[in-house]
Image: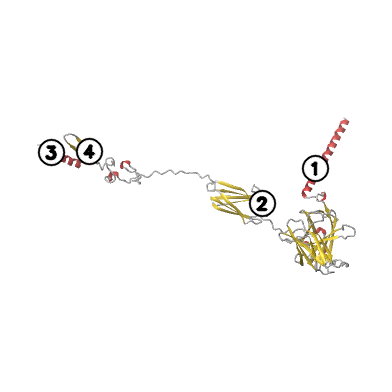
């Protein structure tokens, strides 16, 4: 009987199993015994839902758990950005943006290729920047500017049309791509000075004392700060017109020299040229002497005088400029020239006013004898064409003694013959003389004179007005 019951139960289970699998996707397997009953739910794939708790996954239930690529991220299908990126795109990460507020750096500022009128200024920046360069003779930088058109790291700007021998200040302003600005100011450079083409003044008080077979030469060196030496040149023909026109007998900074081994009763012509550190040399102070034995007095050296051609006759004292302290001195109607003592005096004549027949022009200054029985002294200087070829000129130091000194302008031809002599007189004045004031002193003098005139005028008006009131009082 028990065996028959078991068979009946088994047959029923088989029938139920067949019915479930043929009519539904769900099935339930149940077992029982005499003690208890248990129910186990198994897979429901496919039901459109990926049942992870039920054991479904992408391997055993692709219909429910696979990426269907429909553009919709379905959590029911367990789709996520890792296994289905086409449907579940990752959310974009928010990019954090920080504004650039830091300007670039300016460094390695350099000034190069400096000339009298131009320079090149270079500098670097640590990031690409466009810069402005401004320059001027003051901290206002008002003389000029230049602007870069492109961002760059290495910068170079050339400046031209500057003044020679001038101090310039410059400023650099740079902006990066975000317009952050930085400035470097207070920088400076100096352009080169104009070449020194101005010679020093000639020596003064140049004298030659003849002796037996020799001559003693003495002079005073000029006060120029760039003076370095003198060159004494001797000639047996005529006064040397430049340092190369004769034999050099002395070179140095001394103020005296003895020239020996000379022939007695023979005239010798000397010129002393001063030099500065730029090798400019003066026009030359000249003198001549004849060595002789003590008991023999040689004849004086006097140039031959010849008639002057018409173009030489036209030369007048008014054609010459007398310049002292960068100011042209006035020549009076009586050919008097007031000169300040102690300041170099330049005498010049325009190149175009000198006829081609002339060889040279001499300026001779006569100094009266210091005492009875002594002879007057003569100091002569050559006029030489300047380096600009604009004028014949000479520069001398006037005598220190306050006095009047006759001055002669002597025109010589190429045969060393005197063609014309023009007379004048230098009147040596004290530096503070009111008759020859410096420009600033003249301005003060004019202002004082004007103030004095105004004061006198006010006083006159006041007195007239006061007198008028008195008359009115008495008439009443």
Label located before the other in sequence (1 or 2)? 2
The Cα atoms of the two marked residues, 4 and 1, are separated by 131 Å
The answer to whether the residue labelled 1 contacts the one labelled 2, judged by CB atoms less than 8 Å apart, is: no
* Vertical comparison of 103 with 113: above or below: above
**Against 193, is 271 above or below?**
below
Query: In the image, what residue occupies the spot 80% across and 42% down?
Result: 451
Q: Which residue is mark 4?
A: 40
User: Badges 3 and 2: C-beta atoms under 8 Å apart?
Assistant: no
Tag 2 secondary structure: strand
Marks 4 & 3, CB-CB < 8 Å contact: no
Mark 2 and mark 4 lie on one chain; the one further toward the N terminus is: 4
Q: Position of residue 200 (x, y in %)?
A: 75, 58
Which residue in the structure is indicated by mark 1?
Answer: 451
Question: From mark 3 to mark 1, how far is it between C-alphas?
Answer: 154 Å
Quadrant (top left, top right, bottom left, bottom right) of the N terminus: top left
Residue 157 lies left or right of residue 305; in this view the side is: left
Which residue of the protein is positioned furthest toward the top in this rendering? 476
User: How far is mark 3 from mark 2, CA to CA?
Assistant: 126 Å
Report if residue 356 is visible in the image: no
Which residue lies under the disc numbered 3? Answer: 6
Could you tell me residue 195's position as x and y percent?
69, 58
């Amino acid at each position: 009987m028990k065996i028959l019951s078991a068979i009946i139960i088994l047959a029923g289970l088989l029938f139920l199993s067949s019915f479930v699998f043929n009519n539904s996707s769900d099935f339930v397997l149940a077992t029982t015994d005499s003690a208890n009953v248990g129910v186990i739910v198994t897979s429901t794939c496919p039901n459109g839902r990926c049942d992870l708790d039920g054991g479904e996954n992408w391997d055993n239930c692709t219909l429910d758990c696979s990426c269907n690529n429909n553009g919709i991220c379905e959590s029911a299908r367990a789709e996520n950005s890792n296994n289905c990126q086409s449907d579940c795109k990752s959310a974009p990460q928010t990019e954090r943006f920080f504004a650039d507020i830091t300007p670039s750096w300016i460094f390695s500022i350099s000034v190069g290729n400096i000339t009298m009128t131009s320079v090149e200024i270079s500098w670097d920046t640590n990031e690409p920047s466009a810069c402005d360069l401004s320059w001027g003779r003051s901290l206002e930088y008002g003389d000029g500017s230049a602007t870069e058109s492109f961002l760059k790291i290495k910068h170079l700007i050339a400046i031209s049309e500057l003044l020679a021998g001038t101090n310039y200040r410059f400023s650099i302003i740079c902006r990066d791509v975000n317009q952050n600005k930085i400035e470097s100011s207070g920088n400076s450079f100096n352009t080169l000075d104009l070449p020194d083409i101005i010679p020093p003044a000639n020596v003064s008080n140049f004298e030659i004392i003849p002796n037996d077979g020799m001559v003693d030469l003495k002079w005073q060196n000029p006060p120029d700060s760039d003076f370095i030496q003198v060159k004494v040149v001797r000639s047996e023909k005529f006064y040397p017109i430049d340092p190369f026109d004769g034999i050099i007998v002395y070179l140095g900074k001394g103020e005296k020299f003895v020239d020996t081994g000379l022939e007695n009763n023979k005239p010798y012509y000397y010129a002393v040229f001063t030099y500065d550190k730029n090798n400019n040399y003066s026009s030359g102070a000249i003198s001549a002497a004849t060595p002789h034995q003590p008991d023999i007095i040689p004849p004086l050296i006097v140039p031959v005088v010849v008639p002057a051609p018409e173009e030489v006759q036209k030369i007048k004292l008014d054609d010459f400029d007398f310049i002292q302290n960068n100011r042209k001195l006035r020549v009076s109607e009586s050919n008097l020239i007031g000169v300040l003592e102690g300041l170099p005096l330049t005498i010049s004549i325009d190149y175009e006013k000198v006829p081609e027949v002339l060889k040279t022009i001499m300026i001779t200054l006569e100094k009266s004898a210091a005492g009875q029985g002594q002879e007057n002294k003569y100091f002569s200087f050559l006029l030489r064409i300047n380096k600009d070829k604009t004028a014949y000129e000479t520069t001398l130091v006037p005598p220190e003694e306050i006095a009047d000194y006759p001055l002669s302008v002597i025109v010589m031809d190429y045969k060393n013959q005197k063609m014309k002599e023009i007379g004048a007189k230098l009147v040596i004045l004290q530096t503070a003389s009111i008759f020859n004031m410096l420009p600033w002193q003249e301005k003060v003098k004019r202002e004082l004179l004007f103030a004095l005139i105004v004061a006198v005028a006010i006083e006159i008006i006041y007195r007239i007005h006061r007198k008028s009131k008195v008359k009115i009082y008495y008439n009443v």
